[in-house]
Image (spheres, rainbow, N blue to C red):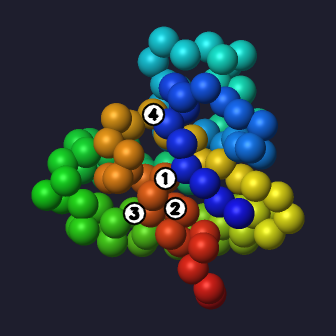
Amino acid sequence: MIKIKRVYEEPALQDGVRLLVDRLWPRGLSKERARVERWLKEIAPSDELRHWFGHDPEKWQEFRLRYREELTAQRELIDELRKLAAHETVTLVFAAHDEEHNNAVVLKELLEKKR
């Protein structure tokens, strides 16, 4: 099972394995409070894509396409995450305010998609 959750929300046992999927560490949050098992900077959108998108909902569809294209270079990590999620709950945590338009949403869709 794969979930997504803002990293600023209180961690819960139901989160299972918490993976931070942002390139930058969340502002004002200690590692102890974040309680993430791994920080997967390499799976986050590139700085260029992140800056271009700027969490603008009008750019959402194009962002999704561009980010999925970037993720093709992370095939091994994607496979690893799929295997992990097949055996336990995985929560992709992110810092963005917009819970509908962020990279964790796209990554979750990709991970849940059949090959």
Q: Secondary structure at mark 2?
A: helix
Disc number at residue 104? 1
**Left of 53 or right of it: where is 103?**
right
CB-based contact (under 8 Å), mark 3 and mark 2: no
Q: Earlier in the sequence, mark 1 or mark 3?
A: 3
Identify which amino acid the numbered label 4 is placed on.
Ala
Q: Position of residue 61 (x, y in %)?
A: 25, 68
Q: Earlier in the sequence, mark 3 or mark 4?
A: 3
Q: Toward the viewer: 77 or 48?
A: 77
Question: How many residues crowd around disc 4 within 10 Å: few (fewer than 14), some, or many (20 or more)?
Answer: many
**Left of 112 or right of it: where is 62?**
left
State the residue position of label 2: 107
Identify which amino acid the numbered label 2 is placed on.
Leu
The N terminus appears in which quarter of the rendering?
Answer: bottom right
Q: Earlier in the sequence, mark 3 or mark 2?
A: 3
CB-based contact (under 8 Å), mark 1 and mark 3: no
Instruction: Using the rendered image of the protein, determine whether residue 94 is visible from the camera's viewpoint.
Output: yes
Determine the CA span between mark 3 and mark 4.
17 Å
The residue sitting at the left extreme is: 58
Determine the CA span between mark 1 and mark 3.
11 Å
Q: Earlier in the sequence, mark 4 or mark 2?
A: 4
Tell me if residue 45 comes above or below residue 15 in the rendering: below
Determine the image quadrant of residue 40.
top right
CB-based contact (under 8 Å), mark 2 and mark 1: yes
**Left of 31 or right of it: where is 43?**
left
Identify which amino acid the numbered label 3 is placed on.
Tyr
Q: Please give the name of the residue rendered at 42% of the width and 71% of the height, measured from the top-left corner.
A: 69
Determine the CA span between mark 2 and mark 1.
5 Å
State the residue position of label 4: 95
Q: Please give the name of the residue rendered at 54% of the width and 42% of the height, measured from the top-left corner.
A: 5
